[in-house]
Amino acid sequence: MSKEVTFSVSSLTGNTRLVANGACEAAIDLGWSIRDAQPGQLPKTDVVVVCFWCRRNSLDDASLEFLSRCEGKRILALGTFAGYPTSAYAQRVRDNVAAAIAERNECLGVFLCQGKLKEQRIEARRALPPEDPHHLDDFGYERLMEGLNHPNATDVLYAKAFVRDYLPKD
């Protein structure tokens, strides 16, 4: 029996694409055939992997639009964001993504890894007045500067392990 999975990838900077490529490799190693999501079309497979970048504590707009076309699918989500994957913020993002998926589908799991922001955006947020909610304090600034090193080979390895653990065995 042939196992097929549809991959939907939304990536502005290449961060999410890098993670998605690793996830694809892991799925292929497990014997899955890969289908690329087609714009405006319903995914033809029962299992779907949505690779997204985080926007406003959830999926980016393109990923949300893709998700709106899915119903009754088993969905695995992998995302990049400008935070630490073990933080409370990361858990809030995972919860929001899982809830968005679970509205009409089954959520198999949500993986997050740190991704980089453009340095110009980091510096612009650092220059905001301290009372602005988007101002970066020293901790936030260091986190985002360290994030310039992500996703890296270790993040891709973790994404591969996540796919191996959470992609259905059937």
Image (cartoon, rainbow, N blue to C red):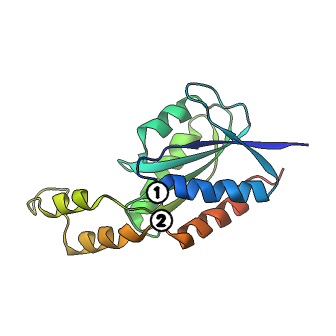
Percent of width and height locating residue 52: 49, 48
The residue positioned 46% from the left and 57% from the top of the image is 15
Q: How crowded is mark 1: few (under 14 residues within 10 Å), some or many (20 or more)?
A: many
The residue positioned 24% from the left and 56% from the top of the image is 121
Decide if residue 137 is in sight here. yes
Percent of width and height locating residue 6: 68, 40
Decide if residue 166 is in sight here. no
Q: Residue furthest top?
A: 40
Q: Name the residue under label 1.
A: 15
What amino acid is found at the position of numbered circle 2 in the picture?
Pro
Q: Is mark 1 on a helix, strand or loop?
A: helix
Residue 98 is left or right of residue 134, and the answer is right
136 or 160: nearer the viewer? 160
* Contact check, label 2 and label 1, Cβ < 8 Å: yes
Location of residue 153 (image quadrant): bottom right
68 or 92: nearer the viewer? 68
Q: Is mark 2 on a helix, strand or loop?
A: loop
Location of residue 106 (image quadrant): top right
Percent of width and height locating residue 55: 38, 47
Percent of width and height locating residue 122: 24, 61
Does 22 sit above or below residue 63?
A: below
* Residue 151, label in figure: 2
Q: Which residue lies furthest to the right in this view?
A: 1
Does 153 sit above or below residue 97?
A: below
Tell me the distance, in whole angstroms, between the alpha carbons under discs 2 and 1.
Answer: 6 Å
What amino acid is found at the position of numbered circle 1 in the picture?
Asn
Location of residue 28 (image quadrant): bottom right
The residue positioned 46% from the left and 70% from the top of the image is 86
The residue positioned 19% from the left and 70% from the top of the image is 137
Q: Residues within 10 Å of mark 2 (few under 14, many from 20)?
A: many
